[in-house]
Amino acid sequence: MTDAELDRTLDAALGVDPSPEFLARVRNRVATEPTRTPWLGTWRHVDAWGMAGLGAAAGTALVVATLVWPRPPDLPPAVGGQSAGTAPPVPVEAVTPPAKPGQGLNSPEQGMRPRPAVAAARPSAQAAVNAEVVVAPAEAAALRTLFANVSQGHVAPSWLPDLAAPSGPLEPIDAIDVAPIAVNPLRPIEAEAGVL
Amino acid sequence: MHERVDSIRGGIMTADLQLEREFDALLVESSRLAFRVAFSVLRQREDAEDTAQEAFAKAHRAFHQLRDRGRFRAWLVRMTFRLALDRQRANRRRTARVLSTDHLELAPAPATPSHEDTERATHVWNAIDALSEKLRIVVVLASIEGHSVQEVASLLGLPAGTVKSRLFLARQELKERLAWMADTGHP
């Protein structure tokens, strides 16, 4: 059998067309298929909706965390109405210690200015004076609640200890009886025969 | 807010409508291919149409997941071929069960003028059925709609060299099985 004969045979066997109503049947079948949820849309839309949902959830979580999370206590205003973080730079000359005569390269006699590193360290020293006092959030919240209740009369401050009053005499501590430790000298090791 | 929701809903519905149109265009383009693939396995028009229809229904259900529309025909061909093989196995089991319980004997075909054609077609189909599945799908796809080796490779997701060698082996087997037809002047 030649290739041409085989091709003719296969064409005759496989060259069958579907019936004219086949396409209509398939369309009908596809049309009666359960449709997808319109709000979900295509996968591309699902992707977009997923991203939008994640963004909304993250935003909601941030807002809730901001509202619920206890805030640190309000800090008293820093000297000059500025906080420690925004303290103005201190003039170098104002914080430079008086130099001793004959001190070397930084001596005023040689007209040398302080090194920049030293000058930069001065404002941090000033900031350390106004440093924020860190209080545990729970403790700060408890203190705020206590102050509010005392100021509104819900809690009588009478039971609070008077820290300003001098405390009473301390009770004497019982003597601690410690037995003296006896130290006995060790006996010399007896040398075995043939070892030493 | 309502306008925005309506706008989004309208956009999604427009996208769905576009998706349906895309699918319908591919359905028109590929319906004959799917039918012929199914028919090459099942050899019965009704069965082949049912199988191709089932394949299109499955394709429709998952069409929105198909990112590369250019792969639709290959996807459809593989799906149709698998469904047709499943149906063929089911048909064979059913036929065997009926024959074993009813002891039916198939009546010989009447000696009509088309008897020779029927006999010839039966032999051809038997030869095609004797091929392994790998060889059969290759020779079927190459024979229907005049697909080239490259097109068959693309449809099956195989290297062109693999398709070429399988096609050669399939044709050799068919030639050997159908050689007697040429000798007796059947084709």
Image (cartoon, helix red, strand yellow):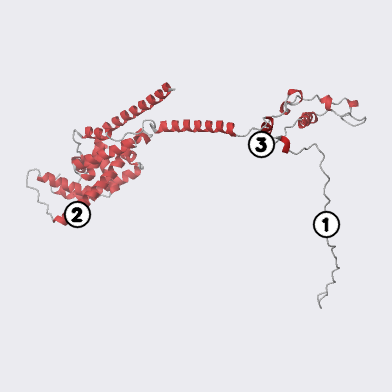
Q: Position of residue A28 (x, y in %)?
A: 24, 33
Residue A80 position in % (x across, y down): 76, 23
Identified by mark 2, the residue type is: Arg
Residue at the spot 23% in from the left edge and 33% down from the top edge: A23
Q: Which residue is mark 1?
A: A176
In the image, taking residue A100 as reference, residue A2 lies left or right, namely left
The chain containing the residue under callout 2 comes to B
Question: Which residue is identified by label 3?
Answer: A142
Q: In the image, B113: left or right of A108?
A: left
Q: Residue furthest bottom?
A: A193
**From this viewpoint, which residue is outermost toward the right?**
A101
Residue topped by disc 2: B97
Q: Chain of mark 3?
A: A
Quadrant assignment for the C terminus of chain B: top left
B126 vs A36: above or below: below
Horizontal side, residue A185 vs residue A39: left or right: right
Tag 3 or tag 1, which sits nearer the N-term?
3
Whether labels 2 and 3 belong to a single chain: the reply is no
Which of the two marks, 2 or 1, is nearer to us in this view? 1
Position of the N terminus of chain B by quadrant: top left
What amino acid type should be assigned to the residue bearing mark 3? Ala
Task: Measure how far apart labels 2 and 3 are at the Cα level.
Answer: 83 Å
